[in-house]
Each structure stands twice: as structure tokens, then as C-alpha cells.
Image (cartoon, coloured by chain):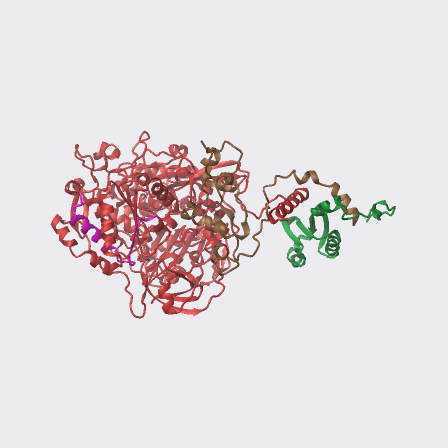
């Protein structure tokens, strides 16, 4: 009897026996995406990356049981989801969920407490420190994974209520350079175009981004566009030949930290060959340098670029000279070129300059303002744009992403918030001086007795700096000594350092707005209740407001219904920013609840459909009434960068300095870090989902086979990767798709000896203060042959009571 | 023993065919996976382990699923959630437009060759 | 070759202890399980019914097994052989007036 018939018979026998015995075939252990009964589908956004895929979560009773994509979506068109998004709902009901407030006792053990006890302690400490050490001794550290309503509330509480700008967030570690790049080049943060430009582009320049793993659903749009239009050219510029490069027409290697030379080199080729748009440069470009105050001439720019010959670029970066020329040609000679980049350019010692140089290429070739053309910075987190950048929840900003140092804007916000009447700070004003950026904040955080640490308390939410800060060993002690309050859903390294841990509600348990990379805000409805005593951040902010005497400032503090709280906060926010170019006045809560596509700002009124392309008359509503926003636009201007004087974007003269950590004889390798598709950030969620945990159960170090042969390291060998700051013990993965001398380590593992941020350089960009995670000088030594790795490591409730990290 | 023959032969012949037989297989991966990558055993030419069904992996390797990061785990789960055959609801997580537009009762795999997922040629698409 | 499906009822807390015992029978494959309910679906492949009987006896003798019941048997080639007259059925047991005591 052949095998298949035999199997058929056996299967049939087993199936009928199972039915008779009352066992459902494919029993409960098997994947939840089986024919599951869903009672209702609730609209929302994916909890993860900055793509902003919109979804429906499937609910049965009070449980999330499934997930599907929203087929009407403008972001994940046709409703595609990646493996993380498809499974993220499993996080909600995981047994490790924190469900009760915890307070660390004198012996260092976190003990369950009531909300009243925890909040009373927080109130006591905040009031005590405000009095003893000043209003800047208590900080808030937020996240691009909090909702817009929550971030806005905390920001208002601190800047309007406490008169303190000690508010920063984890977007400082990822998007700050892109923000400064947009502000200095174009005058206003965030992209001019949108994802819709993908399907209209003729050349796509992917640089500093492993799109296939970091934004897989956008990668799918790119690959589909290329498949349907084979003439579309794709250029990929990166230090590793990742899956992204498999669709490239041209792959440009570049040693980490050196690509500024490539961008200047491409500009030189474009100008030398006459491929630049003279008219565009004349009407919409302005040459400058430094902080952009002094105007220079086109000749100054051309002269500045002379140094960047293809040969110079090849020597500096490893990118072949011919590739620089080819890339320049593809970029300049297409009818519409779209650049997309992410951390490869932002997390750099000169990240702002890298951003400026990409904008340069677009300005000199006229690649803004038309379909398919844009310089598009991809955002990492789901709500870094909407929640942190747009609400101004960073140390130097106010809502509308305008600087706190801008007197006129500061006075407007003071008036809108009625700070003069409600603030508890005797100054009765918003502090004109910016607070501390993330790295500085955590460097200044410490115990009462430490006079060198002026920040004595911090409350943080939905972020894990005890794992994510670069050179993280430097900051752990400070977090443990200070009064640290952590709001989260799971045990994390940061919760392990906390004095108080507050259990948080997950996005589908509270609802709220997320604004993604393409300026699109989308509302997630509450689908199920939070477990145990977990609460929404906005409720926590409201309780602090009440206890600190700021109920009038935070007008929604006395609401009991979270949805109502969210709506009031949202209304306050869009009222505050109604006269900025980021206006969402037309995105009423009602409209967001009903919409299946969300709203892209600027959207000044309910009739406005939202804006696909900024700075173009007829598409950008700012042109209809520029005075309202404080801008002047000539009546005959078709395209105008109105946030810049005279509407001209800045073409910056930027060098290619070697400000990243340099290799040496002792530390001869460049270590670069990044993501893998299946894991998210510090793995607190994705390491708890079986499928994503199995796909990437632990970190590894990717070594070029030539380097490995020299060091006599084989695949699977255990290797020590060490910098002057710290080390990791990792299994080696020998590859032939990296550059020699460059190694790669993913960022997700929470096991202490695999936490890559112990190794990472803490050099920061001098303008944005964003750390240079992409370049660290390291050495590699073989420890042993292959060993079994204890993968899927998770910080447990028990480990949170220990001082040292295991 | 002979009585067993008779008593059980009278049994369930009918129920043998009452259950929908979609070649339901064991819901357990035949050998412990131990957090190894699927390629370790399933990729053609891998020497670490005895190869198992390399054709499926080879087909997947040339597919758009591979390019777009839809790996084995996405459809087949991992050790604790393993299913040897994916189901239409998994396909629907991403392809709900196609699944909802199906005018016949056939499954995706009837026309989209697993694991290249390219549609078989020579007939009209049931999605129109 | 005879294929038999059977339902094994066992003490649900002893699944781990029972597993090596089941695995020691190479003719036995576990097809479905509901450990919380203490049930397993087994498929047994044997050359003849005598071998099947031995397996049943072994299982019933194990303290962790509550019951082991056949569900269906597929006789495969044996049926063809029967028709061709290659096997003789002994009807003695059936005709016997001996009854098993109820337990």
C-alpha cells in the first residue's frame, strides 16, 4: 500500500475517533487563527511600527481572539499585515501582564499595593522634590507608543502646570535627527508627501533602512510597484546586503558612518553633468551652511562639493565609484524620485547633516511637490509623529512642534492653557528654557544624596530606557537610586529599576489616536477591558493632576469614562494647534471614530479631506489662508516652503566628518545594530508571542566570512563582542552579505549578556542629541565552540526584585 | 479476539466518512524544533539535519511570500502552535479581499500552488 | 496490515509519565490529544489481530491508563485475502455460549 493512501486511511480513522471521543480536531494548542468565532470586529491601528497599518481586532466576550487588516486602509493597502501585527493581539491576555501597582520596599522587593497607596507616594515625592530641589527635579519620559491624548496630557501637566520643560521621550533616540533635518531644510517637521508617492514614483532611493524587516508592509508596496512597473528603478544604500537589496537595481555598499560622502558625491555628479533643475533651485532653493542663518551662493555649493569625487567617495565609504555615478543618474533623471530612510541616517553622530544632504538631493533635482517625488523619513514607532513630535512632547518643543524658545508661540500656548491662572509654579508661565534631552536627562538622574544629579524623580511610560539607552550601564544606577515610576504592561529591565511600577492598559483596552509616518492620525476604539487593576495612562495623568492641584488645567481629570477623557484631551489639543500648519481641527473625534482611513494634517476643517502633499497650492490648505498660520505666500506661488522665509528650502553645505567612534588596533571592527522582522524593540511583547519568539529567540552577531576565517570563528561559535564600554556573549552567524570589518547585532534581546546597548557608543548628534547607535568600535574574540543558547529570555516578575541584571 | 473483528466491523463505517476529511494530520511537529530555524532541516542542501520535505522550502524561497517576510512560522505557527496545514482564516488575515471575493467553495490551495503561491494557469479566476 | 484507531483515557496529571510508555510501542502513533480531558487518539498499525490484542493488554495493564477502547479498524488487504479464501475465520468464539461476566 503506498504511503499516501496509508496516511489517508490512518488520518480518517483518527478523525472519526476524535469526533466520537469529543476531541475537537486541531485541538486548543494549535494556532489561534483557526476558524475562530469572532463576535465583533473593532477598528484600530497596529500597536507596532510607524507604518500605521489599520486593523480590526476580533473580540469574543472580553477577549481578543483574532486580527485582520483593514482592506480600506491607505497605509497597509488591501489590508496586509506582517507577522508581528497579525499576532500582536496575543499580548493582551498573556499571564505575565502586570495587574497591580507595585511599590519597592526597604529590602528592594516590589510589593503589591493599591492605586491609592501608589499615587499617594508619587504625590508625596513629587511635592517634596518640587519644594526641595525645584520644579525641574521631576521629569516625565514618554514614548512614541503612547496615544496622542496621553502624551498631550502629560506634556500640558508638566509644561503648563509645573512650569517645567523636563519632558522628553524615546523619539529622541530615533527621530530627533529627522525632526531637526526637516526643520532646518524645509522649515517644518514631517514629510511633505505620503505613502501614495510610492505607487507614483519612478526611482526609489532606500538608504539607511532595512525596509524589508523594519517596515515590511511598505516594502510590500515597493515590491508590488516594481513588479507592476519593471521600469521603476530601486537604489539601496546600506552596510549589509539585506533582503531589501533583493529588489535593488543598484546596491550601494557604505561603511557605517561614512555615507555623507556618498550623498555629497551624488550631488557633485548631478551638478557636473547638468542633471539638476536650474529653475527649481533658483525659485525654491537657498544655499546656506551652519545654522542656516547666512545665505551663500550656488558657486559656494559647487566649490564645496569638489572634494567629493567618485574616487574620494569610494576610498572613504567602500562604495564603488561607478555606483556613485549611476545612482546620481538614476536619482536625477527620473521623472519622480522618492527617498525613504530611517535609523541608518538618524541614529548617527551627524544624523541631522545626513538628513540635510538627502533633502539637498531632492531640492537640486526638483523632487518635491509632484506625485511620486519626496524625501520621506520613515518613523519607527506607531505614534512618535502624532503623539510626541506633533504635540511637542520633547524638552524643547510645545504643541504644534514649535520651539518653546519662540516667545510668540509660547505666549499663545500660555494663554490657551491659562497657565497664568492654573500653574502651581510661582512663575505662572511656561519656562522659556528647554529642558533636558533623553541622554542628558538620564545622566542627570540620581538619588537625593547625589549632588551631581539634579533630577531626582522621573515617571516614564511605554518605554524601556534601562535596555535602550546607549552605553546603558552608565544609566542603570541613576534609575535605581532616583524615585523612578514606570508605567508598563509587562516586567522589563526598566521596571526592574523602578521604585513604583504602575500596571498599564494595552492600546485595545483603552483606545486612542496614533499618528503615523505619513501625517495620518487614526483612532483605535476600545475593544476589551484591561486585566486586573491595569489603567490607561491618561487616567494616571489625571490622578496626578488632581493630587497636584491641577484639575482646572487638565479639564478632563475628573472624568471617569476613558473614552470621554480621551475626547476632551483631543479637543484641547486640536484647539491649541488649530493655527499651526499641523492643524487637525477638522479631525473631530466623531470623524475619527467613523473614519476607516484616518485624517492627514493639515486638515483645518471638517470639510477638508486631509492633505496628501504639502507645500503645493491646491493640495495644501495652508495656501488658502496663510495669514491664519502666521505665513505669507505670494499669490502666484504654485509651490512654496511657507515655513521658511521666502519659501525657499535650504541647500546645506555639510562636510563628512569622522565624528562616530573610530576603530583602532584594539577595537578594529565596526559594530552596527538594527532590527529583525519578527521582533519589536526590547522584545517585551514579541518575545511573549510564540511565533515571533520562535523566529528570533535570541541575538547573534553577524560576521563576514572572510573576517570569520581570519579569526578562526565558525558558524554557531560563541563569541565575545566588546567595546570600551561593555561586552556581549553571542553566537556567531557567518554571512557573506556584510562588508568586511563590519559586524551586525540585533537590538532585541533582554538577556543581560546579550543586551547590545551595553556595548553601544553614546556619542550624540550635536544638534539633535540623538545617539549614534549605528557605529561602535569593537573587538571580537572566540569564547568557545557552539553551545545551546537559553533563548526566549524574559525579565520575570521575580527578577524585578533583583538589583543586578541576569 | 475474533469477536472484536465482528463487533467493530459493525461499528463506524458510516462515521468514517461523516467527518470532513481534509487530510487532517497530527497537530504536533514530528520532531522537537528546539528553536532552530525551519531552514535547518527543510532547506535543500542543509547538512545540519536530515532533510525533510525540501521541495516546500525551495518553492517558498522563490515566492513573493519569502520576499515579503511571510515565513514558515506565519502560516504554520511554531512548536506550541504548530499546524502542518494552514487554514483559510490565516490567508484571510492578509488576503481578506481575495477570500471574501471567492465565488466558489474551493480553498486557496486549490489554485495557488503551495508554496510558490503562483496561481495555476488555464482557467478563469474565481475572484472576479 | 491492519490499522486501528483507539481512544486512550488516562489520568490527565500523568501524561508526562505515560508518554514514554506509549512511545515504547512502535506500532502506536498519537494522532490527537486533549490532555486536559485525559484523552488521546491513537492509531495502531499491526500485521494481524493477535499483535493488536497484545498491545491492548499491555495498555490495560498500565496503572495510569483508565481505559483503552477501539473505535474503528481498517482491515485493508486482509479483506482481499479473505475473499480469495486465503484466510479462514474461526467462528468458535461467537458460537460459544460462554458469556463474559460483567465487570
Asked whether, in this view, residue C98 is left or right of residue B101, the answer is right
Tell which residue pokes out farthest to the top in this image: A607
* Residue A431 visible at all: no
* Residue A608 visible at all: yes
- Residue A146: percent from left, percent from top: 39, 46
- Residue B57 part of the magenta segment: no
- Residue A154: percent from left, percent from top: 36, 46
User: What span is in magenta?
Assistant: A247-276
Q: Is residue C7 above or below residue A669?
A: above
Residue A560 versus residue A440: which sits nearer the camera? Answer: A440
Residue A248 versus residue A92: which sits nearer the camera? Answer: A248
Chain given the colour brown: B
Chain given the colour green: C
Indicate the quadrant where residue C57 lies. Answer: bottom right
Asked whether, in this view, residue A244 is left or right of residue A100, the answer is left
- Residue A308: percent from left, percent from top: 19, 56
Tell me how many marks there are.
0
Chain given the colour red: A
- Residue C45: percent from left, percent from top: 68, 52
Amino acid at each position: 500500500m503506498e504511503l499516501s493512501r496509508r496516511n489517508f486511511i490512518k488520518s480518517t480513522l483518527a478523525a472519526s475517533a476524535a469526533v466520537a471521543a469529543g476531541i475537537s480536531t486541531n485541538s486548543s494548542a494549535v494556532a489561534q487563527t483557526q476558524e475562530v468565532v469572532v463576535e465583533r470586529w473593532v477598528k484600530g491601528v497596529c500597536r507596532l511600527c510607524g507604518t500605521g497599518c489599520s486593523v480590526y481586532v476580533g473580540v469574543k466576550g472580553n477577549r481578543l481572539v483574532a486580527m485582520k487588516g483593514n482592506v480600506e486602509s491607505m497605509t497597509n493597502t488591501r489590508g496586509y499585515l506582517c507577522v508581528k501585527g497579525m499576532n500582536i493581539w496575543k499580548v493582551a491576555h498573556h499571564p505575565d501582564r502586570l495587574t497591580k501597582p507595585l511599590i519597592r520596599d526597604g529590602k528592594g522587593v516590589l510589593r503589591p499595593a493599591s492605586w491609592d497607596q501608589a499615587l499617594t507616594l508619587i504625590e508625596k515625592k513629587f511635592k517634596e522634590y518640587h519644594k526641595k530641589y525645584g520644579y525641574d527635579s521631576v521629569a516625565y519620559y514618554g514614548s512614541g507608543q503612547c496615544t496622542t491624548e496621553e502624551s498631550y496630557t502629560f506634556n500640558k501637566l508638566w509644561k503648563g502646570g509645573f512650569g517645567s520643560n523636563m519632558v522628553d521621550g524615546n523619539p529622541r533616540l530615533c527621530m530627533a535627527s529627522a525632526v531637526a533635518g526637516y526643520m532646518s531644510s524645509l522649515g517644518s517637521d514631517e514629510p511633505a508627501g505620503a505613502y501614495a508617492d510610492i505607487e507614483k514614483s519612478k526611482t526609489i532611493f532606500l538608504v539607511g533602512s532595512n525596509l524589508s524587516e523594519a517596515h515590511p508592509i511598505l516594502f510590500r508596496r515597493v515590491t508590488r510597484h516594481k513588479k507592476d512597473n519593471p521600469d521603476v528603478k530601486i537604489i539601496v544604500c546600506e552596510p549589509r546586503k539585506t533582503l531589501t537589496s533583493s529588489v535593488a537595481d543598484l546596491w550601494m555598499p557604505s561603511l557605517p558612518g561614512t555615507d555623507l560622502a556618498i550623498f555629497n558625491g551624488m550631488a557633485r555628479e548631478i551638478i557636473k553633468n547638468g542633471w539638476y533643475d536650474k529653475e527649481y533651485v533658483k525659485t525654491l532653493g537657498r544655499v546656506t551652511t551652519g545654522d542656516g542663518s547666512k545665505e551663500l551662493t550656488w558657486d559656494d555649493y559647487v566649490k564645496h562639493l569638489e572634494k567629493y569625487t567618485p574616487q574620494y567617495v569610494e576610498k572613504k565609504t567602500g562604495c564603488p565609484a561607478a555606483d556613485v555615478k549611476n545612482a546620481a543618474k538614476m536619482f536625477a533623471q527620473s521623472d519622480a524620485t522618492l527617498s525613504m530612510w530611517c535609523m541608518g541616517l538618524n541614529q548617527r553622530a551627524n544624523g541631522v547633516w545626513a538628513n540635510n544632504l538627502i533633502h539637498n538631493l531632492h531640492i537640486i533635482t526638483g523632487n518635491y511637490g509632484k506625485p511620486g517625488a519626496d524625501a520621506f523619513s520613515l518613523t519607527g514607532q506607531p505614534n512618535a509623529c502624532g503623539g510626541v513630535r506633533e504635540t511637542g512632547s520633547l524638552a524643547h518643543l510645545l504643541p504644534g512642534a514649535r520651539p518653546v524658545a519662540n516667545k510668540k508661540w509660547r505666549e499663545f500656548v500660555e494663554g490657551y492653557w491659562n497657565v497664568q491662572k492654573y500653574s502651581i509654579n510661582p512663575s505662572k508661565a511656561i519656562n522659556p528654557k528647554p529642558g533636558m534631552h533623553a541622554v542628558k536627562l538620564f545622566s542627570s538622574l540620581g538619588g537625593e544624596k547625589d549632588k551631581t544629579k539634579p533630577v531626582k524623580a522621573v515617571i516614564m511610560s511605554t518605554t524601556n530606557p534601562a535596555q535602550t539607552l546607549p552605553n546603558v550601564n552608565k544609566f542603570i544606577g541613576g534609575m535605581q537610586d532616583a524615585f523612578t515610576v514606570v508605567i508598563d504592561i509587562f516586567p522589563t529591565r526598566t521596571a526592574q529599576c523602578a521604585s513604583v511600577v504602575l500596571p498599564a492598559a494595552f492600546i485595545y483596552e483603552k483606545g486612542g489616536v496614533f499618528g503615523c509616518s505619513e501625517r495620518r492620525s487614526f483612532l483605535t476604539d476600545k475593544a476589551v477591558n484591561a486585566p486586573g487593576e491595569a489603567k490607561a495612562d491618561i487616567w494616571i495623568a489625571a490622578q496626578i493632576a488632581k493630587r497636584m492641584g491641577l484639575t482646572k488645567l487638565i479639564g478632563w481629570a475628573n472624568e471617569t469614562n476613558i473614552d470621554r477623557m480621551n475626547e476632551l484631551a483631543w479637543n484641547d489639543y486640536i484647539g491649541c494647534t488649530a493655527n499651526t500648519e499641523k492643524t487637525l481641527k477638522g479631525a473631530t473625534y466623531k470623524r475619527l471614530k467613523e473614519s476607516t482611513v484616518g485624517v492627514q494634517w493639515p486638515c483645518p476643517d471638517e470639510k477638508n479631506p486631509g492633505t496628501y502633499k504639502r507645500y503645493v497650492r491646491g493640495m495644501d490648505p495652508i495656501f488658502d489662508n496663510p495669514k491664519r498660520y502666521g505665513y505669507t505666500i505670494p499669490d502666484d506661488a504654485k509651490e512654496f516652503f511657507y515655513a521658511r522665509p521666502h519659501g525657499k528650502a535650504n541647500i546645506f553645505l555639510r562636510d563628512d566628518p569622522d565624528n562616530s567612534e573610530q576603530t583602532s588596533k584594539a577595537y578594529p571592527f565596526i559594530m552596527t545594530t538594527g532590527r529583525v522582522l519578527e521582533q519589536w524593540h526590547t522584545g517585551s511583547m514579541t518575545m511573549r508571542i510564540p511565533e515571533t519568539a520562535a523566529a528570533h529567540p535570541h541575538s547573534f552577531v553577524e560576521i563576514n566570512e572572510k573576517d570569520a576565517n581570519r579569526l578562526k570563528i565558525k558558524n554557531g561559535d560563541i563569541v565575545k563582542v566588546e567595546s570600551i564600554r561593555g561586552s556581549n556573549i553571542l553566537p556567531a552567524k557567518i554571512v557573506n552579505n556584510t562588508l568586511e570589518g563590519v559586524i551586525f547585532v540585533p537590538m532585541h534581546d533582554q538577556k543581560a549578556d546579550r543586551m547590545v546597548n551595553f556595548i553601544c557608543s553614546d556619542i550624540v548628534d550635536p544638534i539633535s542629541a540623538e545617539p549614534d547607535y549605528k557605529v561602535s568600535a569593537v573587538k571580537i574574540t572566540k569564547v568557545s565552540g557552539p553551545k545551546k543558547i537559553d533563548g526566549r529570555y524574559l525579565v520575570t516578575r521575580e527578577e524585578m526584585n533583583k538589583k543586578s541584571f541576569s | 479476539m475474533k469477536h472484536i473483528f465482528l463487533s467493530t466491523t459493525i461499528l463506524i463505517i458510516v462515521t468514517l466518512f461523516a467527518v470532513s476529511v481534509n487530510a487532517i494530520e497530527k497537530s504536533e511537529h514530528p520532531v522537537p524544533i528546539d528553536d532552530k530555524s525551519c531552514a535547518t532541516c527543510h532547506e535543500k542542501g542543509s547538512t545540519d539535519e536530515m532533510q525533510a520535505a525540501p521541495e516546500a522550502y525551495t518553492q517558498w524561497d522563490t515566492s513573493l511570500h519569502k520576499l515579503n517576510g511571510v515565513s514558515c512560522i506565519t502560516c504554520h505557527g511554531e512548536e506550541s502552535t504548530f499546524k502542518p496545514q494552514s487554514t483559510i482564516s490565516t490567508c484571510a488575515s492578509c488576503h481578506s479581499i481575495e477570500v471574501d471575493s471567492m465565488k466558489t467553495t474551493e480553498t486557496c490551495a486549490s489554485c495557488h500552488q503551495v508554496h510558490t503561491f503562483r496561481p495555476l494557469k488555464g482557467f478563469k479566476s474565481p475572484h472576479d | 496490515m491492519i490499522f486501528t484507531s483507539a481512544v486512550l483515557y488516562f489520568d490527565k496529571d500523568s501524561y508526562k509519565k505515560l508518554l514514554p510508555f506509549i512511545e515504547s510501542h512502535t506500532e502506536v502513533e498519537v494522532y490527537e490529544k486533549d490532555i486536559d480531558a485525559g484523552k488521546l487518539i491513537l492509531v495502531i498499525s499491526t500485521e494481524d489481530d493477535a499483535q493488536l490484542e497484545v498491545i491492548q493488554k499491555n495498555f490495560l495493564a498500565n496503572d495510569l491508563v483508565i481505559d483503552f477502547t477501539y473505535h474503528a479498524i481498517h482491515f485493508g488487504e486482509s479483506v482481499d485475502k479473505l475473499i480469495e479464501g486465503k484466510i479462514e475465520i474461526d467462528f468458535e468464539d461467537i458460537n460459544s455460549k460462554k458469556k463474559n461476566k460483567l465487570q
